[in-house]
Image (cartoon, helix red, strand yellow):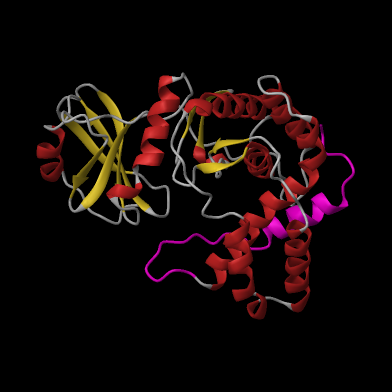
Amino acid sequence: MSVFTTVTAEDLGPFLKRYSIGSLLELKGIAAGITNTNYFVTTTHGRYVLTLFENLAADELPFYVNLMAHLADHGIAVAAPIANLADQYVDELNGRPTLLVQCVPGTVVDEPSAAQCFEVGEMLAQMHLAAGSYRGQMQNPRGAAWWNATAPQLFALMSEAEAEQLRGELALQAGQDFADLPKGVIHADLFRDNVLMNGDHVGGFIDFYYACNDVLLYDLAITLNDWCVCESGDMDAERAKALLLGYQGVRALQANETAAWPNVLRAAALRFWVSRLYDFYKPAAGEMTFAKDPGHFQRVISAHAERQDFWL
């Protein structure tokens, strides 16, 4: 359960007086997430999500929070932040930087349909376009510089065959040049557990705390690598085609993006293979972790390397 900092109704009463969202009816911890404390807060005005940030400081939050507000203002399905009476999104509770957001409809879908993948692709493209006018800047903290610095710490902990494959993938990506691909603000972590589906429609994109400025196609690849993947690491072609059709119905890919697509798919899988390996072999002390298969994205890369059809 992602509750590291305890909040009681007595704590929340004075806090809510700094907002115009009514009086507390119910406070309930949320059993999701691994790095922040989250509660459902139900008041006389509605239902909200309260997040207490365990790792990010208050001065690190404006890029993400203002992005969420910007996207909500442009009609994107996101959990819009709520400002307090001082017109500030970021507040403080029990010694932690704190954010209240609107509760969006829907649930996490473990086995998405092609129709749901289409809707996610469409909303992702709309998000990319809406974020084009956002002026915030954030370098990708988990880009090529990070994986090239992190992977050498893991080679000695892996099997020889796995280490050799990882070295080969790093070498392949070092030879790529994505500098001319369209860039903008990306979510960078749009896995199934960061989207709430309201039936076949997107209720909301959530958890923007890896958002950054990077290649738009990379964001699409991250999303497809999770939403359309099978347990074997290969892709479900029907779901993949649906997600890409939804995306390109809003934002058509350029010729250079189509040419780069196979290697961008592998780059997106590499980023999460390295991060899962790192979490598996070097878990942070005191951090809540879930047993995620560190070889999952290794299999995704292998499947991408063997296929001929990339669904474009």
Residue farthest right in this picture: 308
- Secondary structure that dominates the magenta span: loop
Residue at (72% x, 60% y) in the render:
298
Quadrant for residue 68, please give it: top left
Magenta stretch in the rendered image: 283-312
> Of residues 53 and 168, which is closer to you in this image?
168
Is 77 inside the magenta-drawn segment? no
> Taking 83 as reference, is 198 left or right?
right
Residue 222 in view = yes
> Taking 48 as reference, is 176 left or right?
right
Is 287 inside the magenta-drawn segment? yes
> Of residues 139 and 156, which is closer to you in this image?
139
Quadrant for residue 219, please give it: top right
Residue 124: x, y in percent?
59, 29
| Quadrant of the image containing the C terminus | top right
> Of residues 190 and 176, which is closer to you in this image?
176
Residue 1 in view = no
Residue 237: x, y in percent?
80, 36
Residue at (46% x, 30% y) in the render:
134
When the figure is inspected, residue 298 is found, relative to residue 208, above or below; the finding is below
